Structures are given as C-alpha cells and as structure tokens.
Image (cartoon, grey):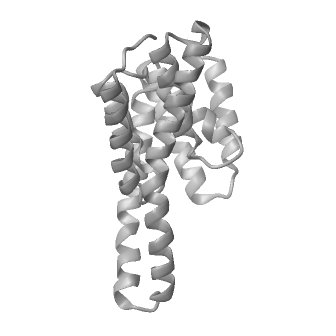
Amino acid sequence: MNIHMAPGDWLALFGQYLLLSLLSVSGAIGTVPDMHRYLVDQHGWLSDMQFNASIAIAQAAPGPNILFVALMGWNLGLNAGGGLGAGPHAWALGMFGLLVMMGGILLPSSLVTYNAARWGQRNRHRRSVRAFKQGMTPMVIGLLLSTGWVLVRNGAAEQHPVSAWVLALVSAVLVWRTRIHLLWLLGAGAILGAFGLV
C-alpha cells in the first residue's frame, strides 16, 4: 500500500494523537474507534488489515498494550515510504511514523496521569474524587465496547459475520466471568482463523 504524506500531514497526525492522548481515560485501546476513523476511513493511510493486525500483534506480544500504536505508526511510515521492500528510506519513514504516533499518544497522557494520580492520591477521601471515579466506570466500559465493535466489524465480520460476532461475544464473556489469560483467547482465535472459521 503506497500513500503520500506531506509534512503537514505528519503534523496533523501528531496533533490528532495529542488529542487522542487526552481522551484515553481507559487506556489508548479505548480510542481505537477514533484512530480507525482517522487513519482508515478518513485518510486511507492504513488498510483495515494493517489496522487490525497492529492491534492483534501488540496484544499477543509481551509488554504494554500501547505497542499497537507503535505498530500503526510503523505501518503508516512504511506505506508512505513505498512498502517494506522499498529499502532504508521506507524503514526510516516507518521509524519516523512510530515516533510521531507514540510521542503524540504518550506525552499529554503521561503528564496528566502523573499529576492527576498524585493529586488523586492526596485527596482520595474526598467525596467528589470518589464520585468522579465511579462516574468514569460506565464511560470506560462504553469506550471498550466501541473498540470491540470496530475491530470485529472491520475485521473478520466481513467474511464470516455470524461466527466472528459469536467469537467476540464468547471471548467478552470469558474475559468478564473468568480469569482465563488473553493469550489463550488470541490463540483460539488464530486457530479458528487458520481453519477459515472466522
């Protein structure tokens, strides 16, 4: 996938991720729907497959789940450089894309979290602080549900709509009601995908 990105596009991308960082109250994964809207639907800088693969690979890999943003930036940079086979120029753009997106998503949220966590800890007994935390719960759940919706709708649901939604529902219930490790669910999804069932 080849795309053209002007310097203004990179700047706009950085600004978009600065804004998303401030909205990531449930973690960056909660902003996936808007990332999809911006990167795939609005600009066409990533394909649906690249978008979903970035998230799946990062979730299966050890380390923080924010790595999916780095993979998206890497893929976007590669697309701007002409693809993986285009050589060092494409790899340099891949690294640049990674830095732009990770810098944008990490800077504001890190500063806000550091200061808010210290303030919240000092004032944890206040009624307003407890009410704020409880009020955030439905919003976080809604953001996570919308993330799941986007990932299933734009992934396997195009080819296997029923089995993809059933798999997503079963996975959600298992995560909610059991302590099963996410890697087992990712592995099960990979096996079902390998056999063409989802």
Residue 56: quarter of image = top right
Q: Is residue 131 above or below residue 166?
A: below
The structure residue drawn at horizontal position 37% and vertical position 45%, both measured from the top left corner, is 146
- Residue 115 position, x and y percent, is 46, 73
The structure residue drawn at horizontal position 43% and vertical position 20%, both measured from the top left corner, is 47
The structure residue drawn at horizontal position 30% and vertical position 28%, both measured from the top left corner, is 8
Residue toward you, 180 or 93: 93
Residue 62: quarter of image = top right
- Residue 12 position, x and y percent, is 31, 35
Residue toward you, 27 or 80: 80
Residue found farthest to the top: 85
- Residue 74 position, x and y percent, is 54, 28
- Residue 57 position, x and y percent, is 62, 33
- Asked whether residue 181 is in view, the answer is yes
- Say whether residue 178 is left or right of residue 102: right
Residue found farthest to the left: 42
State how many labels appear. 0
Residue toward you, 123 or 36: 123
- Asked whether residue 197 is in view, the answer is no
Q: Is residue 55 above or below residue 77?
A: below
The structure residue drawn at horizontal position 70% and vertical position 50%, both measured from the top left corner, is 181
Quadrant for the C terminus in the image: top right
Q: Is residue 180 above or below residue 132?
A: above
